[in-house]
Amino acid sequence: MKTLKFITATLLLVGLSLTSCQDNDDNVTPSADNANAATSPTASNLKRSSMHKGDHDDFLDGVSCSSILLPVTATVNGTEVTVASESDYETVTDILAEYNNDDDSVVLHFPLTVKLSNHTEITISNQIEYNALMTACEQADNATEDAINCLDINFPISIFTFNLNLEQTGSVVLESDQELYAYMDNFGDDAYFAVNYPITATMSNDAQVTISSDMDLSTKITECLATEEDMEEAEEDAEEVESILVEGAFKVQSFIEASVDKANTFADYTITFAGDMSCLAQNTADSTANDIQGTYEVAAETEVNLNINFSSNATLQLLNHSWEVTSYTQNSVTLQSSANAAITLVLNRV
């Protein structure tokens, strides 16, 4: 019945206007495309965008839908660490990043307090309760009911309310994520709402954007979620590339610069990559030649990059690029210079 009333009222409004017409700060006429029910996509977008974002400490708790309230104590790769403030996060990440070929372990000490996506705080007494939280988080993620972390609405924002006849009944100014979440979570089935656009938001790359409509909000969320998915996929690929590099020795199969393959320049060298982000080039043709020390780093944004740095050998310095990983297998890594797409490198396992 509610849907029928809404459709009927909407048809009457279509002939009048397809855009919102705001008379003043407290008076707005809804249109066919901006009057939203509690179950509308806009309601879901606003609710999910205003959830507490618990992804900033995932390296510590492994749960993206909640965050641990500090202080907390954890045993990280066998080392007990007390995280008293966010400045202590670096201590944890440094331990986890010390080697890229080990099995990282974070054991939380209970009891601890977490803040959930609905902004409430609960105490977790043991690992069983924590496992239940992780399961609930995974279920929310699978049901697309998890927080949207890639877009932060900037406050304050105004929302107008209407009855089922689309007559304005009030307005509210919301000052925070928590207020917006509670408002949308408790919005009734007997009313409609409209956002007073334009509003602004901060994206995950810190860019500020202006949002002009419900459709614009949906588009920006869709785009940033796609980028977020690409970043997550790149992180998984980066881990695979790291594991491939540290599992064997490599030779330069191909090094193309200015359309010329210069792989023979490196024919005498075998390169190994260690778990501590150091690399070593050995001259297999001259047993008296010194080994050449270097460093490397595998990084991920929306693509995977391999940065190589040899500082004491002119030949190996030719490999000193930020390389984009264009493809990889268990026995080969194909790279392209991020600065010059005409320079490519293929490393093959010996």
Image (cartoon, helix red, strand yellow):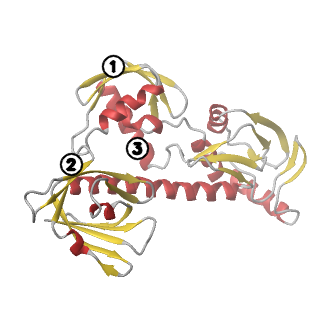
x then y, percent, for residue 55: 46, 39
Under mark 3, the amino acid is Gln
Does any portion of residue 1 appear in the rendered image? no
Alpha-carbon distance for marks 3 and 2? 38 Å
Q: Quadrant of residue 77?
A: top left
* Secondary element at tag 2: loop
Nearer the camera: disc 3 or disc 2: 2
Instruction: Find the residue positioned furthest to the bottom.
Output: 259
Alpha-carbon distance for marks 1 and 3? 24 Å
Alpha-carbon distance for marks 2 and 1? 35 Å
Residue sitting at x 17%, y 64%: 269
Under mark 1, the amino acid is Phe
Q: How many dots with numbers?
A: 3
The residue to which callout 2 is attached is 274
* Secondary element at tag 3: helix
Name the mark on residue 139: 3
The residue to which callout 1 is attached is 110
For the residue pair 46 and 266, the one nearer the viewer reads as 266
Say left or right for 180 vs 246.
right
Between discs 2 and 1, the one toward the N terminus = 1
